[in-house]
Amino acid sequence: MRGLTLLLPTLDEAESLASVIGRIPRDTIESAGYRLRVVVVDGGSTDGTKQIAQSLDCETIQQAGGRGKGNGLREAFQHFMQTEDELLVLMDADGTYRPEEIAGFLEHLRPPDVEIVIGSRMKGVIGPGAMTRRNYVGNQILTWLAVVLYSRYVSDLCTGYWAFKRSAIEKMRLNSTGFEIEAEMYTSAVHEKINMTEIPIHYDPRIGQSKLGSIRDGIRIAMKLLKRRFIRQPRS
Ligand SMILES: Nc1nc2c(ncn2[C@@H]2O[C@H](COP(=O)(O)OP(=O)(O)OP(=O)(O)O)[C@@H](O)[C@H]2O)c(=O)[nH]1
Ligand SMILES: [Mg+2]
């Protein structure tokens, strides 16, 4: 059986983690031919998130290299490369994305040339109250900026639901520390000629507190897009 890692980044997600993990369609994943490994990468939660992850038999990675989602994901990607798993599915752990929709990602990763599947909320359904107007407008502007700078169509730059083949994780060159990591995954995929496709997904209201500081993080994402346009690979 081929290995599939489902990666859940967490920072104080005790309210949502158990229900997200409980909703993973394990039978569907297994009947698609995959052995599932659930990995939680935690950024220093103090609300019992890690204990919940451990009690649910997940692998947990305590991120060592400083706070931030980007730091956590990069550590988890390195960990993934030490396994033999073929696929990695990345999903925020706050209850906004539907574990039940994993099957669509696996289906769309099947063609040999597709290496990344991006879950697009803009092509899918954003539930009432799931996204603030500010985040919606900010994401539209950032997505537009990405397409203008990189000439590669994407409809939802800041989505937190992605699926990767191992080859994509191996090729991406990333150094983001925070919420600019998704934008950098897109820019690196363009530079490294990694073939991406999109599928529509649902976006539901968050459980628990947001960690995003929309204006500050929006500026960091815009700066990352500009920087990677001219400096194709991070130096560090
Ligand atoms: N490992 C790790 N995960 C983090 C860190 N900060 C946030 N996360 C997780 O990253 C995911 C996205 O964070 P959110 O706060 O939901 O940010 P967002 O989805 O852009 O914003 P909302 O729309 O308000 O939910 C969540 O699962 C967080 O728990 C961190 O420093 N380290
Ligand atoms: Mg969220």
Image: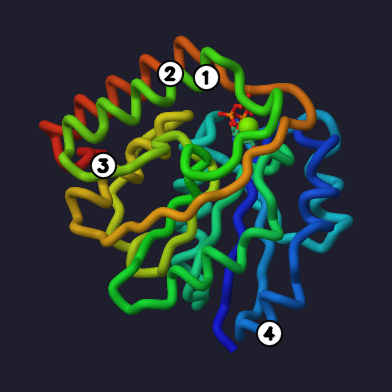
- In this orientation, which residue lies closer to the viewer: 199 or 229? 199
Residue type, numbered disc 1: Asn
In the rendered structure, are the residues bearing label 2 and label 1 in contact, judged by CB atoms less than 8 Å apart? yes
| Ligand 1 has an atom within 8 Å of the beta carbon of the residue at disc 2 | no
Q: Is any part of residue 62 visible from this angle?
A: no
What residue lies at 47% left-to-right and 55% top-to-bottom? 199
User: Looking at the rendering, in which quadrant would you find the N terminus?
Assistant: bottom right
First-in-chain label (3 vs 1): 1
Whether residue 140 is visible, yes or no, is yes
Q: CA distance from mark 3 to mark 4?
A: 34 Å
Depth check, mark 3 against mark 1: the one in front is 1
Q: Which comes before the other along the chain, label 4 or label 2?
A: 4
Along the horizontal axis of the image, is 164 left or right of 207?
left
- Measured as percent of width and height from the top left, residue 43 is found at 63, 35
Q: Whereabouts is ligand 1, in terms of quadrant?
A: top right
Residue topped by disc 2: 138
Residue 36 in the image: above or below residue 185: below
Question: Residue at the location (20% across, 27% down)?
Answer: 227
Please, what secondary structure does the residue beneath circle 4 have? helix
Element assignment for label 1: helix
Disc 1 under 8 Å from ligand 1? The reply is yes
Circle 2: element type: helix
